Image (spheres, rainbow, N blue to C red):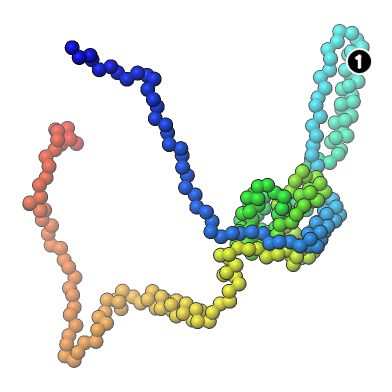
């Protein structure tokens, strides 16, 4: 007798899943920052340092002190020590309350700046900046690469300054500054922005540079104006004017006038084969 077929064992070979593949498109255009000279770099860094120091702009961090847990003792001397400690804590709290709160020292000056990549990006999207400065030491470079296209599309001068974070961040009380923007409502940095803008090199954005650099041709302007005038004439014409015959009729020939179509009665098609309902329930529904 033939043996019965056996079921496949549990230890069967699993099919390997194909690796996930994601399609991505490469940008054919190469956008890059303009090269900044050494003299311009030193001038920009020095002006920013001097201005920040004169304004006293600085971020003050609130260092939370760890609370000391008093040791529990049975002797009366321990209780006296605890009372003395509580008195010292109260004095320290009063002195800390009199001191300046944590945050930026001149708040109105801080509102005139955009510090950090995220804040600069949001301000550029809202078109609120006059000047953008990015740090060249940002790694990876993709962190600040999108600022080139954003600033060029908004018409905001932007430049990549080496050692920006190294020189300016400690003056302001930060660890690093990868991007710095000056808002349009700035009054504290108006003179500095006007002197820095001429030293910032132009941005290299191919699809925007071609449109800005090429002068307008008078022939193209005339053609576009003629096309716009034609479109306006077509829009202004009514339906009756368009329905009129445009052919010139010969002498004695009359134009054919079409009468409107009137539907008197609708008759269903008798040759149409209709399928019967599958069940009585379906028919009742």
**Viewed as shown, does residue 283 lie left or right of 54?**
left
**Viewed as shown, does residue 120 lie left or right of 206?**
right
Reading the image, the residue beneath label 1 is: 80
**Viewed as shown, does residue 162 lie left or right of 26?**
right
**Viewed as shown, does residue 80 lie left or right of 257?**
right
Residue 44 visible in the snapshot: no
Determine the residue positioned at 84% across, 50% down: 56
Q: Quadrant of residue 190?
A: bottom right
- Total numbered labels placed on residues in the image: 1
Helix, strand, or loop for circle 1?
Answer: helix
User: Looking at the image, which residue sits at the far left?
Assistant: 270
Q: Percent x, y for residue 50? A: 85, 56
Determine the residue positioned at 63% across, 54% down: 145
Viewer-side residue, 86 vs 121: 121
Residue 226 visible in the snapshot: yes
User: Looking at the image, which residue sits at the far bottom?
Assistant: 251
């Amino acid at each position: 007798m033939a043996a019965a077929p056996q079921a496949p064992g549990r230890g069967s070979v699993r099919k390997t899943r194909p690796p996930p593949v994601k399609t991505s498109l490469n940008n054919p255009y190469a956008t890059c920052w303009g090269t900044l000279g050494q003299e311009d770099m030193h001038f920009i860094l020095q002006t920013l340092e001097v201005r920040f120091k004169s304004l006293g702009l600085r971020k003050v961090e609130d260092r939370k002190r760890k609370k000391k847990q008093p040791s529990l003792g049975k002797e009366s001397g321990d209780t006296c020590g605890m009372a003395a400690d509580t008195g010292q804590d109260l004095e320290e709290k009063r002195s800390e309350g009199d001191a300046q709160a944590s945050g930026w020292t001149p708040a109105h000056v801080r509102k005139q700046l955009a510090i950090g990549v995220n804040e600069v990006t949001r301000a550029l999207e809202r078109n609120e900046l006059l000047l953008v400065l990015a740090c060249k030491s940002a790694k990876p470079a993709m962190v600040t690469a999108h600022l080139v296209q954003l600033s060029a599309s908004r018409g905001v001068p932007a430049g990549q300054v080496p050692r920006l974070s190294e020189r300016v961040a400690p003056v302001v009380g930060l660890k690093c500054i990868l991007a710095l923007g000056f808002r349009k409502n700035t009054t504290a940095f108006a003179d500095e922005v006007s002197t820095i803008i001429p030293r910032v090199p132009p941005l290299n954005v191919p699809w925007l540079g071609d449109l800005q650099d090429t002068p307008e041709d008078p022939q193209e302007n005339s053609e576009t104006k003629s096309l716009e005038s034609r479109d306006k004439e077509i829009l202004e014409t009514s339906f009756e004017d368009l329905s009129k015959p445009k052919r010139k009729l010969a002498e004695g020939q009359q134009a054919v006038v079409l009468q409107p179509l009137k539907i008197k009665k609708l008759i269903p098609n008798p040759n149409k084969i209709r399928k019967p309902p599958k069940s009585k329930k379906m028919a009742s529904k």
